[in-house]
Image (tube, rainbow, N blue to C red):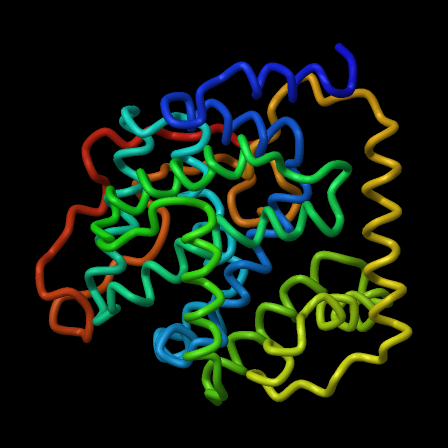
């Protein structure tokens, strides 16, 4: 297989009908490392909306159990990518996400914004740092994939194209990014988590590197000290250099899913999708309706 053969395969597919297949090939074969980093950044951006970041702080899940929340979020989202919307595993994952979201007063606008980040941020990341940019074909498929996911999550007024997703994201951030003390704690905990994945002597540099990847609007919203311009250029240059190096490598022959990422730490012996996430206690500030701990159709996943 040559370097661009898989792209040729992608371009032979229909982005309106085969959007899952295209998105799976793009995310797990062409750019698995980049998608992991871009989706981390996408979730990080959502903290800068006070109604989102503040709620996450109130639940304490992203400050006291940060690794588990990271693992569960990645695994639930990726279950749909790996198994497809019609599988028992994906239906269980979507059910779990819906059960958690319905336990809190989350607006449709906030949910739609989060969906927009999943569509737009990977494309922008690849434009900046990927071994190639996403094609219009892939962006269209990504928009269609997340439109389908959004409908399964009960989100309404979903943008109708990649361009509309992008415009919605930019407008929402301009209107809603702002300071929230709890959101800053969530952001700090997330940066600390990412630093913890590396040897302790490297942790401060990793944290600085993470801050260097935040744009000025995020730096301002979280009231972080602006990164040194030279260091920011160094980090961004290193990522661009990595992209050029990856372009010279042979293509990946097998898909790489989130459950195989070394950053997923909490399930060395495998996991059950139906057990991922939180289970709010009736009468304890969560959803007043009891939910079964192991929804029917859950499938155990092997360790990576």
Decide: is 279 above or below 254.
Answer: below
Q: Work out whether 53 lies above or below 89.
A: below
Residue 191 location (% of width, % of height): 64, 69
Above or below, 19 relative to 92: above
Location of residue 226 (image quadrant): bottom right
Please give left or right for residue 164 compared with residue 209 in the image: left
Q: Position of residue 221 (x, y in %)?
A: 55, 83
Dividing the picture into quadrants, the one containing residue 121 is bottom right
| Position in image of residue 113 (x %, y %) | 39, 62
- Total labels: the figure holds 0
Residue found farthest to the left: 289
Residue at x 36%, y 39% (from the top left corner) = 273
| 156 in relation to 259, above or below | below
Left or right of 175, for residue 190: right
> Residue 26 at x, y = what percent?
58, 31
Q: Residue at image x 78%, y 79%?
A: 227
Image quadrant where residue 301 sits: top left
Q: Residue at x 60, y 76 (%)?
A: 218
- Nearest the eye: 286 or 123: 123
Query: What quarter of the picture does the C terminus occupy?
Result: top right
- Could you say which is closer to the camera, residue 273 or residue 99? 99
Q: Residue at x 88, y 37 (%)?
A: 245
Please identify the quadrant where the N terminus is shown.
top right
Furthest residue toward top: 1
Q: Relative to 51, is 268 on the left or the right?
A: right
């Amino acid at each position: 297989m040559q370097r661009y053969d898989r792209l040729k395969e992608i371009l032979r597919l229909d982005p309106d009908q085969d959007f899952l297949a295209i998105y799976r090939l793009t995310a797990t074969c062409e750019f698995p490392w980049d998608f992991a980093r871009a989706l981390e950044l996408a979730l990080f951006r959502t903290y800068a909306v006070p109604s989102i970041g503040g709620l996450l702080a109130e639940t304490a899940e992203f400050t006291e159990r940060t690794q588990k929340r990271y693992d569960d979020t990645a695994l639930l989202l990726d279950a749909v990518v790996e198994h497809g919307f019609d599988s028992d595993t994906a239906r269980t994952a979507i059910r779990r996400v819906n059960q958690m979201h319905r336990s809190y007063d989350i607006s449709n606008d906030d949910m739609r914004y989060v969906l927009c980040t999943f569509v737009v941020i990977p494309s922008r990341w690849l434009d900046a740092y990927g071994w190639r940019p996403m094609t219009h074909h892939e962006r269209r498929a990504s928009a269609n994939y997340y439109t389908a996911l959004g409908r399964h999550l009960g989100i309404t007024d979903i943008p109708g194209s990649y361009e509309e997703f992008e415009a919605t994201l930019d407008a929402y951030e301009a209107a809603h990014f702002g300071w929230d003390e709890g959101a800053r704690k969530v952001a700090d905990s997330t940066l600390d988590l990412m630093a913890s994945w590396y040897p302790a002597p490297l942790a401060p540099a990793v944290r600085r590197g993470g801050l260097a990847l935040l744009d000025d609007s995020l730096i301002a919203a979280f009231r972080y000290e602006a990164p040194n311009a030279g260091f920011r250029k160094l980090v961004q240059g290193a990522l661009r250099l990595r992209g050029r190096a990856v372009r010279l490598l042979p293509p990946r022959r097998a898909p790489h899913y989130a459950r195989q990422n070394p950053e997923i730490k909490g399930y060395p012996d495998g996991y059950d999708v139906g057990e991922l996430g939180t289970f709010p206690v009736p009468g304890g500030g969560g959803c007043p309706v009891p939910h079964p701990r192991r929804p029917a159709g859950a499938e155990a996943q092997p360790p990576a």
